[in-house]
Image (cartoon, rainbow, N blue to C red):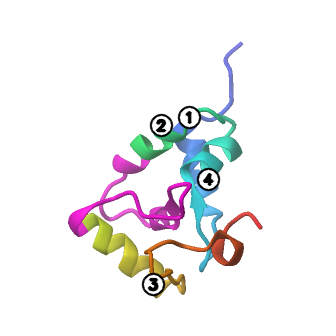
Amino acid sequence: MEDCEPSLPIRVYTVIASIPEGKVTTYGTIAHLAGAPRNSRQVGTILQRLPKDSKLPWFRVVNSQGKISLTGPDYIRQKKALLADGVLFTRSDRINFKIYGWPD
């Protein structure tokens, strides 16, 4: 009998689709909620492979320090998307998980 559990990418997409507007979470939290608690780097790899026109709110995923892991134009694109989503940054360019973290 075949295993009917969805693949890790599908589980990751499902969790990311659940992040509410104005909230962020970490790669590690996504991995945990997707049933792969030790695979936070794999979550990053899955997100890197998303098509540019994806409707998934990929930009709501940040590192465990509350910072954007991307650099250059991708960093700017993610920060603009988060600001438009209502997420504010501290002076040190971090996101306060007590205010914006998900799940609460």
Q: Residue 43 appears at what percent x and percent y? A: 50, 43
SS category of the residue bearing label 4: helix
Residue 35: within the magenta? no
Q: Nearer the viewer, mark 4 or mark 3?
A: 3
Q: CA distance from mark 4 to mark 2?
A: 15 Å
Q: Residue 85 appears at what percent x and percent y? A: 51, 83
**Sequence-wise, which precedes: disc 2 or disc 3?**
2
Question: Amino acid under label 2?
Answer: Gln
Residue at image coords 59%, 68%: 24
Q: What residue would you read off at disc 1? A: 39
Q: What residue would you read off at disc 3? A: 83
What range is drawn magenta here? Answer: 47-73
Q: What residue would you read off at disc 4? A: 14
Q: CA distance from mark 1 to mark 2?
A: 5 Å
Q: Main secondary structure of the magenta part?
A: loop
Q: Is residue 3 left or right of residue 82?
A: right
Q: CA distance from mark 2 to mark 3?
A: 26 Å
Residue at image coords 47%, 39%: 41
Q: Residue 58 appears at what percent x and percent y? A: 46, 62
**Sequence-wise, which precedes: disc 1 or disc 4?**
4
Q: What residue would you read off at disc 2? A: 42
SS category of the residue bearing label 1: loop
With respect to residue 88, does 65 lie above or below? above
**Sequence-wise, which precedes: disc 4 or disc 3?**
4
Q: Nearer the viewer, residue 11 or 98?
A: 98
SS category of the residue bearing label 2: helix
Question: Amino acid under label 3?
Answer: Leu
Callouts 2 and 3 close, C-beta under 8 Å = no
Question: Amino acid under label 4?
Answer: Thr
Question: Amino acid under label 1?
Answer: Asn
With respect to residue 89, does 45 lie above or below? above
